[in-house]
Amino acid sequence: MPAEPSDSDREKWLSEQSFRERELALKEREQAEREAGGFEARKWEQERSLRERELSISERAQATSEQDLALRQSEARRARWSNPLTVAILAAAVAGLGSAVVAFVNGRESQSLETTRTESARILEMIKTGNADKAAENLKFLMDAGLVENPRLVSGIKTFLASRTPGQGPSLPVAGTGSFEPVRELRETDPVRILARAVGEVRSDKGSICTGFRLSRNLILTPEYCVKGLQPPNSLTFAAISSKGEAGETSDVILPPKEVIHFANDPSLGDSIPLDIAILETTSPLNEMLLTLSAFAPNGQQQLVAIAVQWLEPAGKMEPIIARDAACSIREVHPYTFAHTCALSGGAAGAPLLSSDGTLVLGIEIGGSPTLQFAVSSDQIVANSKTLQELYHMAPK
């Protein structure tokens, strides 16, 4: 039978057993701690990975939000300009600005036109001297006094004055020593008032105004310099004197003239007054009074009756007038012209000068000096015109 362990052996075994249990417990704790440490590391790695993904998603979301914000801002800016109310306001503003510009331009052009008209009228008055040299002096005065500002007029006057030959140049006749009467103040039964219906105003779209008179239902006579240079699309009209003694029915005139009757310069007149006469044709027949040209040369000291549309002062307008007092008569007879002293002035060029009984036209007014004016003789006009010889059924010379 085995011997029972002693107390020391039992204590030693118990001590070893206790040591081994503690060692095992320690090893188990260490293993548990090691296992716990690996789990925490994996947990940390997983959390870090999760946070990185969350950060990436957050960054992408922020970028998308910024892009969306930029897009919305762009759309908002476009919406401001495409908004119907905004478009309507802009359209109204542009229309208002356009109207203001048009009004400004029209106002400036109207002012410029009115200034030009005023200056042109001023120039016209200054050359109503009947003397070319005096007219040139008056034009120079206008320039020196600064009374003409239109650049085109200033340039034209300077060029004219620089190249003008003494004794030559434009001038309008002034009223002579005789007197005249407005046609509207004549008695309705006055024969001259009836004859005046054949006379009228020849006006171009360039502003020139002369007198003309009917030879037939569609033929009118006037100085060629009154229509010189006019070609379509220029326009020319003839306004006959009405039964009331005023400008009446207006007829369109065909351009260029039907015929221009040319004359050599009259030595007694120099080159300042052209003698050429134009025969004009209207677009429609005229049914009023007609005048007849004389085929015979005029006589010296013969009494005359003049019918004209001329500028009147101080009324400041064109007015149909007649001159037939004792001062209205022939003074000198020249090869193609005759001098007279009838009271005619600006605008009267082309006026018929009739015999005292009003039956025949002895000449057509072309201008002159304050005391002596000139007319082309009717017999010379008829003799040199194929149209008039056919009209009067005359054999050509």
Image: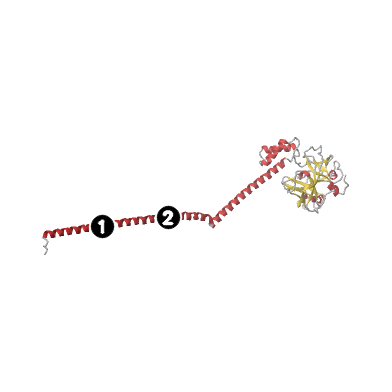
**Badge 2: how crowded within 10 Å, few (<14), some, or many (20+)?**
few
Q: Which residue is mark 2?
A: 60
Q: Mark 2 and mark 1 in contact (Cβ < 8 Å)?
A: no
Q: Using the image, determine if residue 280 lies above or below residue 332.
A: below
Image x and y of residue 235, in percent: 74, 49
The answer to whether residue 27 shows anywhere in this view is yes
Name the image quarter holding residue 313.
top right
Image quadrant where one finds the N terminus = bottom left
Q: Nearer the viewer, mark 1 or mark 2?
A: 1
Disc 1 marks a residue whose amino acid type is: Gln
Tell whether 104 sits left or right of 386: left
Q: Which residue is mark 1?
A: 31
**Badge 1: how crowded within 10 Å, few (<14), some, or many (20+)?**
few
Tell whether 119 sits left or right of 7: right
Q: Which label's residue is closer to the chain start, 1 or 2?
A: 1
- As drawn, the residue found furthest toward the bottom would be 1
Image x and y of residue 269, in percent: 80, 38
Disc 2 marks a residue whose amino acid type is: Arg
Residue located 65% across and 45% down the image: 112
Name the image quarter holding residue 348.
top right
Which is more toward the observer, 77 or 267? Answer: 77
Residue located 13% across and 59% down the image: 9
Residue located 36% across and 55% down the image: 49
Which is more toward the observer, 178 or 334? Answer: 334
Question: Which secondary structure lies at badge 1?
Answer: helix
The circle drawn on residue 11 is none
